[in-house]
Image: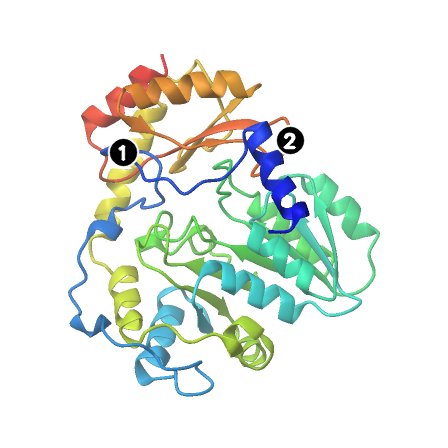
């Protein structure tokens, strides 16, 4: 391996930020994105066997794929939907294809890496605005002439807080900008039967598009862009990850619908939010960055040592949680990320809370 690459690994080892593939040894799950427990549920459709044999523009398209997109569009109250193999592919494929030379992208500084990578691959100029700071967003909008795209996440994965969607949407309307919302961690968790934050606030007709994924609350894989028929046609023609990727296995489309239209979602939502409320009740010893009703509960620390003291305490209690530090979050920032689920028992919640006292 080239010396420059080796040095980067050694630097990570030196400052304690080296990423490694590990297996969880804990039986108590307070770390996965399986918010509704659907990943543990066996799929009933036997048609999950079989590959797709090519991209959807070649041999990989099928009636089940087309039907799946139609049902997703109908469920989420969107004019159309286009499936991608992952949320990463969807963000990358959308942004890199849509933003043109001379355009501008204003994005929240805490958006997912896939959004940043999409911006890098586009021909547009990208500028971040301070996290959830509409004054900073407005300041930057005032200084731009041309086509502008604003990108936010309705629920942020690293801090568990929500974008001020009404204010952001109002700014996008005032300045004629296109609003793009990543709902990866919101769909399934919020809204009627899990339709997400944008739908819950009846804003689906006010945004340019929504990106949803099936690998979080829905416990499966794949993603979809909810958009107009015109935009879908454009993406089919110009989104390179869509054009040049082998399509999802044919059986995946039925499985996606099974997850999204699962009749137990509302009951699981109620249990999830009951568990979140119980966890947050009486919490005064730590600084929380997250919303009180978010499945992602994030504790902030001033230094890595304090963070690791809590992580070790949780581990001794049989609770595994992933400490988060740079470069995943900004330099000088340290977090413990705890995920609450519908399936966590009362005794598990009580044990977790006891470790935080």
Classify mark 2: residues with Cα within 10 Å, few (<14), some (14-19) or many (20+).
Answer: few
- Measured along the vertical axis of the image, is residue 278 above or below residue 72? above
Q: Position of residue 178 (x, y in %)?
A: 65, 62
- Measured along the vertical axis of the image, is residue 106 above or below residue 62? above
Q: How many marks?
A: 2
Front one among 223 and 165: 223
Q: Residue at x 22, y 73 (%)?
A: 49
Q: Position of residue 319 (x, y in %)?
A: 30, 27
Q: Nearer the viewer, mark 2 or mark 1?
A: 1
Q: Residue at x 50, y 28 (%)?
A: 335
Name the mark on residue 111. none
Distance from the alpha carbon under mark 2 to that under mark 1:
29 Å
Q: Quadrant of residue 271?
A: top left
Front one among 148 and 300: 300
Q: Residue at x 47, y 56 (%)?
A: 202
Name the mark on residue 331. 2
Q: Position of residue 274 (x, y in %)?
A: 27, 33
In this rendering, position of residue 263 left or right of residue 66: left
Q: Quadrant of residue 129?
A: top right
From this viewpoint, is residue 5 visible?
yes
Q: Secondary structure at mark 2?
A: loop
Is the residue under label 1 in contact with that under label 2 (CB below 8 Å)?
Answer: no
Q: Secondary structure at mark 1?
A: loop
| Residue under numbered circle 1 | 25
Classify mark 1: residues with Cα within 10 Å, few (<14), some (14-19) or many (20+).
Answer: few
From this viewpoint, is residue 208 visible?
no
Q: Residue at x 35, y 47 (%)?
A: 189
Front one among 12 and 136: 12
Disc nearer the start of the sequence (2/1): 1
Quadrant assignment for the C terminus: top left
């Amino acid at each position: 391996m080239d010396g420059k690459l080796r040095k980067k690994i050694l630097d990570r080892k030196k400052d304690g930020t080296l990423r490694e593939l590990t297996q969880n040894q804990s039986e108590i799950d307070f770390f996965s994105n399986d918010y509704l427990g659907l990943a543990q549920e066996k799929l009933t459709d036997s048609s999950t066997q079989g590959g797709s044999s090519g991209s959807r523009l070649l041999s990989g398209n099928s009636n089940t794929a087309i039907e799946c997109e139609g049902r997703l569009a109908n469920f989420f109250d969107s004019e159309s939907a286009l499936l991608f193999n992952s949320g990463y592919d969807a963000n990358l494929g959308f942004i890199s294809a849509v933003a043109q030379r001379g355009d501008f992208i204003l994005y929240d500084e805490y958006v997912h890496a896939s959004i940043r990578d999409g911006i890098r691959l586009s021909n547009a100029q990208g500028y971040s605005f301070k996290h959830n700071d509409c004054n900073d967003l407005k300041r930057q909008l005032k200084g731009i002439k041309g086509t502008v795209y604003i990108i936010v996440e309705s629920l942020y994965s690293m801090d568990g807080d929500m974008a001020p969607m009404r204010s952001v949407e109002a700014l996008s309307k005032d300045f004629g900008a296109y609003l793009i919302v990543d709902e990866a961690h919101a769909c399934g968790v919020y809204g009627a039967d899990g339709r997400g934050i944008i739908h819950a606030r009846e804003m689906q007709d006010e945004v340019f598009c929504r990106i949803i994924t099936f690998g979080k609350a829905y416990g499966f894989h794949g993603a979809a862009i909810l958009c107009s028929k015109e935009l879908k046609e454009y993406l089919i023609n110009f989104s390179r990850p869509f054009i040049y990727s082998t399509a999802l296995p044919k059986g995946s489309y039925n499985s996606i619908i099974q997850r999204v239209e699962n009749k137990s979602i509302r009951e699981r939502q109620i249990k999830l939010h009951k568990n979140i409320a119980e966890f947050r009740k009486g919490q005064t010893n730590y600084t929380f960055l997250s919303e009180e009703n978010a499945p992602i509960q994030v504790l902030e620390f001033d230094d890595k040592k304090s963070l690791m003291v809590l992580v070790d305490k949780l581990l001794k209690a049989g609770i595994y949680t992933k400490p988060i530090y740079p470069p995943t979050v900004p330099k000088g920032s340290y977090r413990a990320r705890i995920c609450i689920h519908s399936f966590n028992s009362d005794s598990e919640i009580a044990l977790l809370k006891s470790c935080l006292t």
